[in-house]
Image (cartoon, helix red, strand yellow):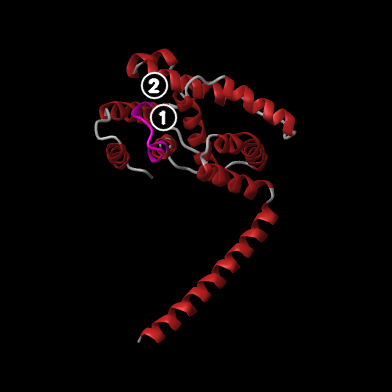
Amino acid sequence: MIRFEDLIDKVRTATPEADTELLRRAYVFSAYEHKGQVRRSGEPYLVHPLEVADLLADMRLDVVAVAAGLLHDIVEDTPNTIDKIRELFGEEVAHVVEGVTKLSALQFSSSEERQAESFRKMLLAMVDDIRVILVKLADRLHNMRTLQHLPEDRRQRIAQETRDIYAPIANRLGMSKIKNELEELAFRYLEPQAYQTLRAEVEAKRKATEGLVEELRLQLVKKLS
């Protein structure tokens, strides 16, 4: 589990003048409001917003985005309203949280490419702050990393949506690392046999390459000794 103090250190490293008090208040509020809630994995629910915030800190985003990561599920999963978020954390944080909440309410139900492209365009058209999309991508990435804990039907639906909607959006934003991980995780659940076969082939090539490198190293050491 990510430690909050480690998150603070990461934010300070990227932005020394960051308002970490805002993050501390968001963390305390999220911990209190999600108290007693448990994820399918059995972990406290707070693990999820912390992981999302950590991913956003890795992107070197501002404290508004990181705070929104800590709070992104509050309206959906607790009795709190956007007005409450606005009152406690300000207009910017509330705006991002509200945007993420609206995106989370949308569900894509077709893998047909034309409809997928239309859905992506609609989703992007709804967003007037890029931080909303970035928080949603971080949310989706952590959910994909823990997808094994969900029932099969939900795994399939979420993985399909990830491959058709969120991985292409990450690609469009130039976020190749996130795009690649989303695609790999979706592939793992949508085509498990093909995934395992490919993974075995990659592992075999990796071991062969390691063996070759070691052989070259030994030859070099021998010649230099």
Amino acid carrying mark 1 in the image: His
The residue located at (27%, 30%) in the rendering is: 18
Q: Is 65 situated left or right of 28 in this image?
A: right
196 drawn magenta: no
Q: Is 105 situated left or right of 135 in this image?
A: right
Nearest to the observer: residue 56 or residue 43: 56
Q: Position of residue 69 (x, y in %)?
A: 42, 30
> Residue 93, labelled with which disc?
2
The residues tagged by marks 1 and 2 sit, at their Cα atoms, a distance apart of 18 Å
Q: Is 28 situated left or right of 178 in this image?
A: left
- The image shows residue 82, relative to residue 130, as above or below, that is above
The residue located at (39%, 26%) in the rendering is: 33
The residue pinned by badge 1 equals: 34
Quarter in which the N terminus is drawn: top left
Q: Position of residue 88 (x, y in %)?
A: 33, 17
Q: SS of the residue at dot 1?
A: loop
